[in-house]
């Protein structure tokens, strides 16, 4: 199947969204769900082709004299494509409940930008070369900017400025020169198993600089000190935070890093030249520092944002360690973290819609009013922490195992320390909700159910269940990751 | 017939101009200008096709053979510039009909279109000719008509802006004339091909050097290379906006073409960049230009003035590409001449649409314009992204090529500064977009809420240009191929 088809459903649905508009909401959102399901089917078709070993490629479009835009599918991209398209459907279901319950404005613009961003995510997932990846990366930045500034107030505009400033600034300031450097040195921008830089005549020191340019240039991966955009972007409506800032945008970042390490540098080149040597501490620092900052945040979405920054750096750490096991763990963690984190964001939004609460300190006892939501929150939190019986445990296990291969126990201890921190900042939230007394209730009064709209609940149930299912049946995923050609 | 196309390229606008004066009717003089411009555009496309297919075209004007007569000389380089000039003229003329009707008194319209045609004729003449003195003649034709066009501006400051340009432009033109005079004294010929052949063997190398210096200064003034750009911001701000759109896309670009033609074809790369270290002058000026002028653009509150400073910055990119003096550097410079011409013209056209409806372009007061003029704003945003160099726009194609070229030569700092100034472009373009789209309107009167889009005759040409620039942004290899061919012609010398 031609991977270009994946761009069709998200783009084709835009005229429908505009046509139905505010007046016929059901049709508008129905068309998005249909597009999402079609996209899922297409991605599934690509998945079967890749599993069967059939090459999946599109034609080329010569953007520059020697470099062209091209899509092709390889296992890592299929994982990401499947993930993003599945969660698009779920998020649309969720946002039907959320956006209406919360009476958001400009919903049509919201859905249009959302669809463009998703098409770009597909472009990034199936990018055949660095140029295509870069184009998709920038389109994602630009199309999500209106989502961040959605509310239009001064705060939202300031957040939008930080968002665009950091993401565009780093990508043009660091990522673009890195790509042009690769073009000048290797003469190609293609993703090739084993990388293209081994014989490009770049010295060890220069290699480290190049890798640093990529790592800091892809600020979507949230490495410190370029992480500020992510908490800033939390002013966006919750479905945006959920899909884009827990899945699509940030995962495009780490996915790009994984892909560049595997197919541009080649994991052997990274280890042989020691290019990642100076960058591993930065990633490790981000893991710990973001976890500690998460502690101090009372706003639930802000805490989740910092938790995301920390988790993303797990994947960066895995990529920089550059062993087969760690990078596989990184790819797996993209999926596991996505399901866990989107559940948590959905729950945060549900609490906002149903009880209008966003501060953790005010969430005492809400578990009795929203037992389903808080139960799902508990499952999501367990998965982020990486405990059985949730999917998060597999990826964490792989990354930890891979980090032991590096010969020191520093990185594995960073991971374990961070796990303890995760427990300490995530688990108190459901515990508080279930065990503390509800301050709004008179003594003797019993709590009534005040769950979010059904659409929200369905979405939450689906992602929370998936967290558990991914623990029980990780096989299809690991088999797909096993197909990655490392050399 | 087709053999005579090089002459027709000039004759059509030149003959149409006096016809315009005789017509005297606003509408019909516009029709006359429109027809002439369209014809010129078609001719230039055919010429480009011929050059790409068969190589250089040489045309002896009046049948007088080259050394004594005037020769028109067309290769890939100037064929592309001919298409750019006549194409932008045709597109902007469509747009000018409504825009000019509002800003220029009806009884002067025929003069406006006459001046316009003379300007087009002058610019095309500079580009097409292979004779050094003829360059000066056409330069004067285009300059004089340009001063006239600028002084048509509504604001009275247009007059001083025009006068300032007249003074500086005349200085530049005289320098060019002096330079050509010295060249003639040193070599005894005015034909470019002959000049190129005789300059190395000339006995009076000092005269050649003087000619070289005068020509350099003159051309740098005319192309508004920093720090000789002082005439440009006011001229662009106060001229009628259709004129600005036309000039921004063509006038400085043509001067840059003259720069290329003299340095590479006439003096030769080795003379210009080897012995006389032109890159010691050009490169610092270019780099300072694109960094400082981008910085200045950030602080401008008049949209036209912001774009004017950005134009000076973009000229800096182009000159930086030229001063690399390599195949890829020249390619980057030339492709940016075309790309920036399209982008800047469409930006000024969008500004003109805003001016048409809102009456001013004071950036901080354009809040929530997206609600009132969505199509104009979208066009502005797309073209603005082209200015920044966002992927899938033409700006990306030129910047990628420029950075690659400077890395290839090992000039890291240049690449870094290009990126830095791109970041500044994000700030100055982003600021406008943010105000247009996301800031809520302060006054919420009924008159500010309804849609009031610019007339279709302005929007359609705007979108034609935006569409063309998007096409060349996605299929950048098309323009890059022409530019690459032009670059190898220039480096190879005149044949």
Image (spheres, rainbow, N blue to C red):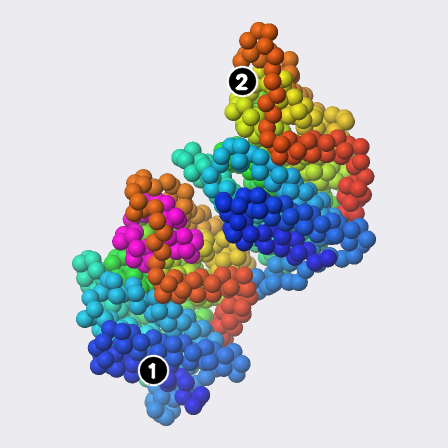
Q: Residue furthest top?
A: A443
Q: Chain of mark 1?
A: B
Q: Nearer the viewer, residue B246 or B227?
A: B246
Q: Is residue B229 above or below residue B138?
A: above
Query: Is the same chain shared between marks 1 and 2?
Result: no
Q: Give the residue pinned by disc 2.
A: A362
- Foreground residue among B439 and B340: B439
Q: Quadrant of residue A158?
A: top left
Residue A279 location, x and y as percent? Answer: 62, 37
Q: Quadrant of residue B104?
A: bottom left
Judge by depth and name the residue closer to the eye, A429 or A273: A429
Q: Is residue A245 visible?
A: no
Task: Residue under label 1, please give it.
Answer: B12
Q: Is residue B32 above or below residue B326?
A: below
Q: Which residues are magenta?
A: B352-381
- Residue A375 at least partly seen: yes
Measure the C-alpha gap from mark 1 to mark 2: 79 Å
| Rendered residue at 53%/49% (across/down) | A20
């Amino acid at each position: 199947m031609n991977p270009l088809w994946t761009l069709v459903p998200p783009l084709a649905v835009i005229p429908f969204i505009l046509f139905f508009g505010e007046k016929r909401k059901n049709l508008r959102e129905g068309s998005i769900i249909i597009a999402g399901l079609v996209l899922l089917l297409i991605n599934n078709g690509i998945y079967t082709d890749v599993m069967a070993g059939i090459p999946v490629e599109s034609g080329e479009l010569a953007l520059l004299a020697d470099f062209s835009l091209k899509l092709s599918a390889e296992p890592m991209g299929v994982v990401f494509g499947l993930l993003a398209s599945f969660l698009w459907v779920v998020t649309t279901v969720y946002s039907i409940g959320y956006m209406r319950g919360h009476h958001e404005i400009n919903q049509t613009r919201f859905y249009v930008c959302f669809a463009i961003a998703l098409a770009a995510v597909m472009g990034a997932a199936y990018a055949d070369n660095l140029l295509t990846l870069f184009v998709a990366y920038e389109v994602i930045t630009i199309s999500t900017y209106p989502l961040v500034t959605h509310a239009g107030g001064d705060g939202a505009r300031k957040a939008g400025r930080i968002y665009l400033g950091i993401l565009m600034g780093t990508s043009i300031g660091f990522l673009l020169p890195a790509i042009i450097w690769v073009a000048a040195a290797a003469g190609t921008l293609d993703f090739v198993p084993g990388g293209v830089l081994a014989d490009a005549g770049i010295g060890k020191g220069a290699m480290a600089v190049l890798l640093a340019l990529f790592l800091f240039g892809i600020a979507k991966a949230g490495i410190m000190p370029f992480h500020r955009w992510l908490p800033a972007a939390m002013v966006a409506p919750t479905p945006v935070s959920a899909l884009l800032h827990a899945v699509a945008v940030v995962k495009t970042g780490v996915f790009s890093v994984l892909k560049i390490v595997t197919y541009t540098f080649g994991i052997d080149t990274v280890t042989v030249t020691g290019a990642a040597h100076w960058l591993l501490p930065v990633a490790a620092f981000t893991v710990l520092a973001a976890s500690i900052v998460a502690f101090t945040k009372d706003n639930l979405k802000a805490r989740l944002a910092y938790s995301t920054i920390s988790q993303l750096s797990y994947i960066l750490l895995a990529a920089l360690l550059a062993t087969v096991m760690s990078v596989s763990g990184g790819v797996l963690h993209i999926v596991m973290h996505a399901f866990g984190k989107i559940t948590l964001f959905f729950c945060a939004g549900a609490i906002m819609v149903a009880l209008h609460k966003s501060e953790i300190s005010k969430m005492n006892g809400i578990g009795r009013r929203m037992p389903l939501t808080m139960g799902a929150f508990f499952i999501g939190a367990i998965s982020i922490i990486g405990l059985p019986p949730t999917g998060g445990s597999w990826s964490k296990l792989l990354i930890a195992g891979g980090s032991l291969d590096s010969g020191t126990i520093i990185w594995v201890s960073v991971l374990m320390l961070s796990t303890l921190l995760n427990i300490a900042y995530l688990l108190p939230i459901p515990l508080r909700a279930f065990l503390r007394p509800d301050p709004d209730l008179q003594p003797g009064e019993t709590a009534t159910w005040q769950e979010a709209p059904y659409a929200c609940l369905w979405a939450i149930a689906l992602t929370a269940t998936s967290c558990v299912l991914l623990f029980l049946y990780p096989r299809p995923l690991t088999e797909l990751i096993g197909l990655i050609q490392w050399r | 017939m087709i053999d005579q196309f090089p002459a027709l390229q000039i004759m059509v606008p030149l003959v149409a101009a006096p016809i315009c004066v005789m017509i005297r009717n606003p509408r019909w003089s516009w029709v006359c200008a429109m027809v002439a411009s369209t014809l010129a555009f078609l001719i230039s496309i055919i010429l480009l096709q011929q050059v790409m297919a068969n190589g250089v075209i040489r045309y002896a004007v009046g049948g007088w053979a080259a050394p004594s007569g005037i020769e028109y000389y067309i290769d890939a380089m100037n064929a592309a510039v001919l298409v750019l000039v006549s194409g932008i003229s045709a597109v902007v003329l469509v747009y000018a009909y409504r825009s000019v009707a509002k800003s220029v008194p009806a009884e002067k319209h025929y003069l406006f279109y006459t001046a316009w045609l003379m300007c087009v004729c002058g610019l095309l003449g500079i580009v097409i000719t292979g004779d050094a003195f003829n360059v000066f003649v056409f330069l004067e034709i285009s300059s004089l008509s340009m001063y006239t066009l600028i002084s048509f501006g509504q604001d009275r400051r247009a007059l001083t802006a025009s006068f300032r340009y007249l003074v500086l432009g005349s200085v530049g033109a005289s320098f060019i004339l002096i330079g050509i005079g010295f060249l003639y004294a040193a070599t005894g010929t005015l034909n470019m091909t002959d000049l190129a052949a005789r300059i190395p063997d000339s006995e009076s190398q000092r005269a050649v050097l003087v000619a070289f210096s005068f020509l350099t200064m003159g051309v740098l003034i005319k192309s508004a290379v920093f720090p000789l750009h002082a005439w440009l911001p006011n001229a662009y701000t106060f001229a009628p906006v259709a004129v600005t759109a036309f000039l921004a896309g063509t006038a400085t670009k043509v001067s840059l073409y003259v720069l290329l033609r003299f340095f590479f074809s006439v003096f030769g790369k080795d003379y210009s960049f080897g012995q006389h270290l032109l890159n010691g002058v050009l490169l610092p000026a270019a780099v300072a230009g694109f960094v400082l002028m981008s910085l200045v653009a950030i602080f401008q509150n008049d949209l036209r003035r912001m774009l004017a400073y950005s134009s000076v910055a973009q000229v800096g990119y182009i000159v930086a590409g030229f001063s690399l003096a390599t195949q890829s550097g020249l390619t980057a410079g030339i492709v940016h001449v075309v790309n920036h011409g399209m982008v800047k013209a469409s930006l000024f056209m969008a500004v003109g649409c805003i001016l048409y409806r809102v009456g001013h372009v004071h950036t901080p007061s354009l809040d929530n314009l997206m609600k009132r003029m969505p199509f104009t704003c979208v066009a502005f945003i797309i073209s603005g992204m082209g200015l920044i160099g966002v992927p899938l726009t033409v700006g990306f194609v030129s910047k990628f090529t420029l950075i690659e070229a400077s890395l290839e030569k090992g000039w890291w700092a240049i690449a870094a500064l290009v990126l830095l100034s791109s970041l500044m472009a994000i700030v100055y373009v982003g600021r406008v977009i943010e105000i247009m789209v996301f800031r809520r309107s302060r006054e919420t009167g009924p008159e500010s809420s309804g849609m009031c889009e610019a007339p279709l005759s302005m929007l359609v040409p705007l979108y034609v240009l935006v569409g063309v620039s998007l096409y060349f942004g996605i299929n950048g290899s098309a323009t890059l191929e022409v530019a690459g061919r032009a670059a190898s012609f220039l480096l190879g010398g005149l044949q």
